[in-house]
Image (cartoon, rainbow, N blue to C red):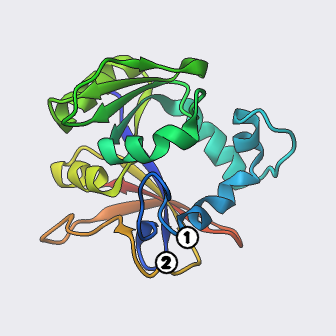
Amino acid sequence: MSEVVAQLSVSLDGYMAGPDSGREHPLGIGGERLHRWVFGLRSWRAEQGLPGGKSGPVDELMAAWVSRLGAVVMGHGMYITGETPWGENPPFHMPVHVVTHHPRETLVKEGGTSFRFVTEGPEQALALAREAAGDKDVSLAGGADLVQQFIRAGWLDELWLHIVPVLLGGGRRLLDEVADELVEWRKTEVLDTPEATHIRLRTT
């Protein structure tokens, strides 16, 4: 069975989006700062059709990570805030399953991205994503509430955290209320750069 994986950027104070996230500020005020580390990577720039970029261990790991993925699950809030900036050619290039209470027809975009809106809950969205992914893995894109649901349910196999040396002071915390007892994760890799510390974790 395909694995469920997530790679997410967080601030030192635990936020994956800044305050007032919404259509006007998709990542919240200051939240764009959490993703600055990726913009210079060769693999990311190639995916966006841009020249140049830095190679190295983080770039190699990112390229390998992207090659694993065959489908995406995300929450309604993430879709709503990202719909406009993603435009007609969203960055996913694979089927995306949106957990929502608002039914609508599947939306097909350029570049291989399609948005399927699943009203039966996150478990059904995951089942559909696994079917779409085939022998590849499923990416859990966010937002924070959906990631927390997956962790509580035991559905997340691997988490790649990019810890950025900045304090946002508010917004959406990634790991609020995910456990009421000790939960162990296994650290499998750590890469440290001036832009971020990258930690890969697996459930035990």
What kind of residue is marked 2? Leu
* Residue 14, quarter of the rendered image: bottom left
Counting from the top left corner in percent of width and height, residue 65 is at 56, 40
Secondary structure of residue under mark 2: loop
Q: In this orientation, which residue lies closer to the viewer: 97 or 162?
A: 97
The numbered mark at residue 168 is 2
What kind of residue is marked 1? Gly
Counting from the top left corner in percent of width and height, residue 134 is at 39, 17
**Does residue 170 appear left or right of residue 128 in this picture?**
right
**Does residue 126 appear left or right of residue 81 in this picture?**
left
Q: CA distance from mark 1 to mark 2?
A: 7 Å
* Residue 106, quarter of the rendered image: top left
Q: According to the image, label 1 marks what residue? A: 30
Q: In this orientation, which residue lies closer to the viewer: 60 or 38?
A: 38
Q: Is residue 134 visible?
A: no
Q: Relative to 37, say whether 13 is above or below.
A: below
Q: Is residue 33 visible?
A: yes
